[in-house]
Image (tube, grey):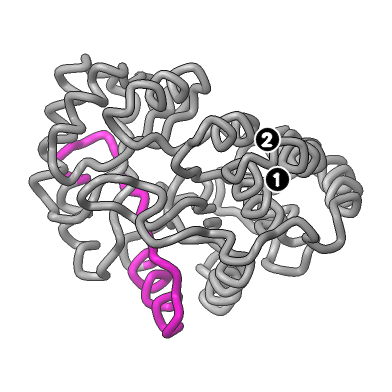
Amino acid sequence: MVTPLRQGRVDLPAARRLARHYRDAGVSGLVLFGSTGEGNLLTLTEKIEMIQAIRDDAHALPIMLGVGGVDTGGVAAAIRRLDATGPAGYLVPPPYYLCPSQAGIIWHYRQIAWATDRPLVLYDIPKRTGVSLTVETMETLAGCPTIVAVKECDPHVLQALRQRGSIAALCGEDRALLAHFSAGGSGAIPAAAHVRPDLFVAMMQLARDGQVEAARSLFGALLPVIRLLFAEPNPAPVKKAQALQGLINDELRMPLMPASRELGARLRRAIGRLPAMDVHRPQAACGDSGEAVTTRNAIPTPLLP
């Protein structure tokens, strides 16, 4: 989920509206403070206030929190502070910039796991961290009872994880969503699902139900929007698209800058070509609780923006 801002401050009313919007669209949970949520630019106080604002809704979706950093001790300390907010779990990348060895990555995650009893989802995103998690490292970490899944952004690694079945794999590459769900993938955390989340939920369920042609058709309609949402640095295009829909203010925390006017015009046209309403979406599109992460400490989140 993006972090709505207004005049430099977190826009809590907009955050509440967004959370309800996603819930009504059939999304199963939210990830706050990931890269799409400008998590590294928010203070701990701002994060707690936004969590509490969303939690004010008696029917709030489960919330997973993105927590990352360079210093292992600092990440563990932040997680201990955030534990009091009662998250469903944490999305944790390896340390940024340092490019540690695989042994160092394993050590890092084990320290984080000792800091909380809540489920952890590994986040393999080399373009932001500078280091990759190998399949063997992920499988080693899966032996820790609270490490329940990985958000994987490389489609080839994602396929290998699905085939090996040693740890639940969530799709982190939006252009691979159809292939992932068609192959029986367990869930996704896609930034593009901020725009028309109802269509993403419907596409997911159609693919899971084996309705391949209908899923492919819907994904084909979404693909131009997906491409535009990554044409400039994330989350600027996502926030531009949401501002065009009247959901939030088009504001980022610097040094991040709003998306260009040219991209905004292209997004407006692409969004306007999407189906006006989702005629494909089945009832109970999100499945049963625990569907996404099939482990002992499962997080019930098949699709999370």
Does residue 62 appear anywhere in the picture? Answer: yes
Q: Residues within 10 Å of mark 1 (few under 14, many from 20)?
A: many
Q: Look at label 1 and name its amino acid.
A: Pro
Q: Nearer the viewer, residue 41 or 217?
A: 217
Q: In this figure, what is the number of numbered marks? A: 2
Looking at the rendered structure, the secondary structure element under dot 1 is helix
Residue segment shown in magenta = 46-75
Q: Check residue 63 for magenta coloring.
A: yes
Q: Residue at x 33, y 22 (%)?
A: 164
- On screen, residue 34 versus residue 200, left or right, reads left
Q: Are marks 1 and 2 in contact (CB under 8 Å)?
A: yes
Q: Look at label 2 and name its amino acid.
A: Phe
Dividing the picture into quadrants, the one containing residue 96 is top left
Q: Is residue 281 above or below residue 126?
A: below
Does label 1 or label 2 sit earlier along the sequence? Answer: 2
Percent coordinates x, y for residue 198 in the rendering? 68, 59
Q: Residue at x 39, y 65 (%)?
A: 62
Q: Which residue is mark 1?
A: 237
Q: Which residue is mark 2?
A: 230
Q: Nearer the viewer, residue 61 or 300?
A: 300
Dividing the picture into quadrants, the one containing residue 163 is top left
Looking at the rendered structure, the secondary structure element under dot 2 is loop
Q: Residue at x 56, y 37 (%)?
A: 181
